[in-house]
Image: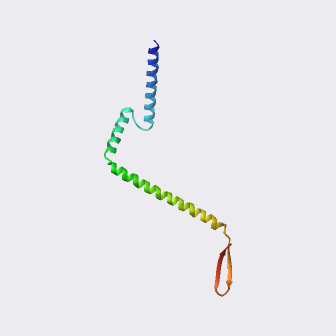
């Protein structure tokens, strides 16, 4: 008797989980598990046509681009720091000789 109740509870839980899965799939525009499996097979077939070398080359390009972006980020941070330092300097015009033009000194 207890085995029947445990079996029934497990079956009810599976039905509930299946219903929740179908609901979530339909929220994403997929009409059930059969369509999900068909989509999986299509994606798998498409991925299988891509050579491992192509994926490796793409990964190398991505890594190179990330390195460049990190360098640019560091350069921009340095420029920002320089701008802050230069912004705190007071520029004063010093007239060394009125006939020869002006020169500038940072204070």
Q: Residue at x 57, y 62 (%)?
A: 78
Q: Which of 36 and 97 is in front in this view?
A: 97
89 relative to 75 in the view: left or right: right
Instruction: Give the image location of residue 6, x and y in percent.
Output: 46, 18
51 relative to 74 in the view: left or right: left
Total numbered labels: 0
Q: Residue at x 46, y 16 (%)?
A: 5
Instruction: Give the image location of residue 39, x and y in percent.
Output: 36, 38
Residue positioned most to the top = 1
Q: In this view, does 15 lie above or below 36?
A: above
Instruction: Give the image location of residue 52, x and y in percent.
Output: 33, 48
Q: Nearer the viewer, residue 37 or 93?
A: 93
80 relative to 63 in the view: left or right: right
Q: Which residue is drawn at 68% across and 82% down?
A: 95
Instruction: Give the image location of residue 98, x and y in percent.
Output: 68, 86
Q: Which residue is drawn at 44% across and 57% down?
A: 65
Query: Which quadrant does the C terminus fall into?
Result: bottom right
17 relative to 99 in the view: left or right: left
Query: Which quadrant does the N terminus fall into?
Result: top left
Scheme of image coloration: rainbow
């Amino acid at each position: 008797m207890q085995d029947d109740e445990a079996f029934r509870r497990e079956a009810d839980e599976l039905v509930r989980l299946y219903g929740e899965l179908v609901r979530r799939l339909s929220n994403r525009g997929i009409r059930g598990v059969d369509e999900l499996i068909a989509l999986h097979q299509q994606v798998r077939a498409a991925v299988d046509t891509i050579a491992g070398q192509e994926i490796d080359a793409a990964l190398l390009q991505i890594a190179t681009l990330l390195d460049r972006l990190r360098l640019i980020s560091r350069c921009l941070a340095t420029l920002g720091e320089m701008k802050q330092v230069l912004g705190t300097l007071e520029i004063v015009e010093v007239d060394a000789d009125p006939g020869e033009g002006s020169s500038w000194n940072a204070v």
